[in-house]
Image (spheres, coloured by chain):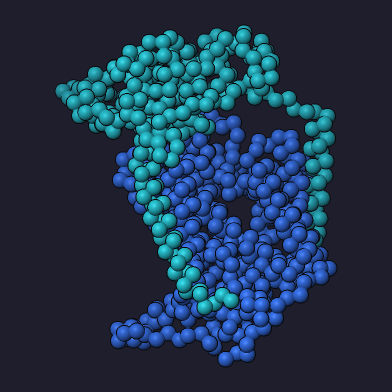
Amino acid sequence: MSVEWAQEYKPGSPFMQWMDERLPIPRIIYNAIGGGYEVPRNFNWLYNFGVLAGFALMVQIITGIVLAMHYNSQIDSAFNSVEHIMRNVNGGWFLRYVHMNGASFFFIVVYIHIFRGLYYGSYKAPREMVWLLGVVIFLLMMATAFMGYVLPWGQMSFWGAQVITGFFSAIPLVGEPLRQWLLGGFAPDQAALTRFFSLHYLLPFVILGVIILHIWALHIPGSNNPTGLPVKTKEDTVPFHPYYTAKDGVGLGVFLIIFVAVAFFLPNALGHPDNYIPANPLSTPAHIVPEWYFWPFYAILRAFTVDFFFIEAKLLGVLAMFGSIALLFFLPWLDTSPVRSGNYRPLFKKFFWFGLIPCIIVLGYCGVMPAEGIYILLGQLASAYYFAHFLIILPIISRIEKTLPMPASITEAVTGKPALAAA
Amino acid sequence: MVRLGAFLVGLFMAGWLLISAGFTTYEMITDPAEKPVEYQFALHPKEVSFAHDGLFGKYDNQQLQRGFKVYKEVCAACHSLNQIAFRNFAEIGYSEEQVKAIAKDWPTQVPSINPDTGEAATRPGLPTDKIPSPYPNETAARAANNNALPPDLSLITKARHNGPAYVYSLLTGYTDPATFKNEEGKPLPKEAYPGPGLSFNPYFPNLNIAMAQPLASDGQVTYDDGTKSTVSQMAKDVSAFLTWTAEPKMNQRKQAGWAALIFLIVFTGLAWMSYKQIWADKRS
């Protein structure tokens, strides 16, 4: 946030002075993530996850570029080229396991980042655009992850591609031709693999671009904070550097310890064994399941089992699955409570911890279990709650809820004492 | 407007899902699905432990070499190992001469061409060759195996849940369907008995497997290191060997993992201290 007490960039050498007058990149960096960017002083550890998400993206891009140097996107040799990376490329096993688990950790970090935003009301005015761009990033991540999972051309790659592109065939009239056009054939084949590889290489850079917009949009109002209060005085903020660079360093260390523990000691725990079987269009796996980060959405897709008059259940499922993410675009206008932070919203807090969070966990569980009996039923109930939570409950509680008294300022929330007059 | 629209959409979604849930409940009550016989009788893999288990476990080269001998003398008759080259055996402790000899004496020769006529021919293996498949193609493999395809074993321990234990259990799990009882003590129904050319094995998800019992008697393979080759020992050794073929870099991976973890713990400790120092004046 540009506040009048923010420190101004001062070039440290004649060269930087010369540079600053011609191409002021150091000034931009200083004002964006350096000493010139003033940030609320009361962030908790949940506020590390934006930086961690950016870090995870960079890990994916760097390992991905090197993997692409050794990968072969021909259907006859894609599977073997991945094994070639694992066996013959120097450090190839490291690159691939980091990339494979890096995708999972990127989602873990981004999910925490999203739920932090949901709890502290970070999507509300004046930060709606930050939120909207975040949802766009999330959608792009899902597309990228899906296409990346197809590349090793194992059984789950192939059948996952079959199922997910099958969504499009649910669209009335144009569905089947559209699906064939997207795949370049009747089923996933060479044309599909090559274009997925191309797009899987492209989309991360699109994500990077949208992240720049996301951060730009964030820096106009400045970050939200656990109280949800706006910054009022100099005492409320600290410069990003060194305060939050130091704190992010700790967060990064802890993140990397967990990441390394999984990538080096349990590298296949988050994957599916069937993907070590080469793709075989003639043999369908017993249970087709997507990667864990898609389980809740998969459960919503499969929750629709009954046609609604002329609308087929399959189409409803596809609409609901996309709708479950699309509704996030409307969130800033659905939750009208003037209080941002869930800490001061007793009703919101109850529905968040006892409604939304268990609902997502149940959905995830139903997504990985076979589509039968009790798992379908639980998935239907949890999906019903999911839509009700965002579309009905949130708008109502933001009307009727009596919020708790709030501290007068961020500083008071931290120190328990009223802020001194601005210096 | 947004909220009214959202309310109606939400009402429809939640309402229709609840109605669907009603249908599901009704179906569950009126038509409870019975679990297929495979689910009722298939067993989870047995508990088995290996030298390479755990955070510090490393492959036992002696065991891998014994397992390789079992593969070579038993499994290789039908199963390929096409991700492995002969040169890779140097990694489990064979010398250069031994590797050359293994390649040269391999029962299946490497497809080649006659240098004079250009006609299809075969030649003895070289260390750089991948292990040749026992069958020239899938059709030949199926023709020789009652139309079942013996899968390639390079990645088998990663391509099954709890792979090493699965392979061990499968190899030691052949049993008489007439005396077999599941965990609830139910005998196998007659319709689940193996058909012609199949064998009963409760560790195989389908219960009936096209592979006849490969390790049938103690001493089937003679070990060079004097280890007693019981069926269980041979099964365990070949499972260890197939763990290595699926994950040949495991030793390096765990070693690098520890180096990375120790570095990161020190890094995080230093980062924590600088964090504490920088924030010292901001906490009260």
Q: Colour of chain B?
A: cyan
Task: In this rendered view, identify the residue nearer to me: A301 or A176.
Answer: A301
Q: Position of residue B175 (x, y in %)?
A: 55, 12
Q: Quadrant of the C terminus of chain A?
A: bottom right
The answer to whether A88 is drawn above or below residue A252 in the figure is above
Q: Is residue A142 above or below residue B219?
A: below
**Chain A drawn colour:** blue
Residue A22 appears in the picture as rendered: no
Residue B197 coordinates in the image, percent (x, y)? 52, 10
In the rendered view, does B231 fall on the left or right side of A350?
Answer: left
Please provide percent x and percent y for residue B77. Answer: 37, 16
Q: Residue at x 70, y 71 (%)?
A: A340
Vertical relation: A270 (above or below) B213: below
Residue A218 in sight from this viewpoint: yes
Using the rendered view, name the quadrant where residue B1 is placed: bottom right
Using the image as rendered, state which of residue A416 and residue A383 is in the foreground. A416
Residue drawn 74% across the image and 62% down it: A349
Which quadrant of the structure image shows residue A59?
bottom left
Residue that appears at 39% across and 47% down: B257
Q: Is residue B191 left or right of B153 when viewed as pictured?
A: right
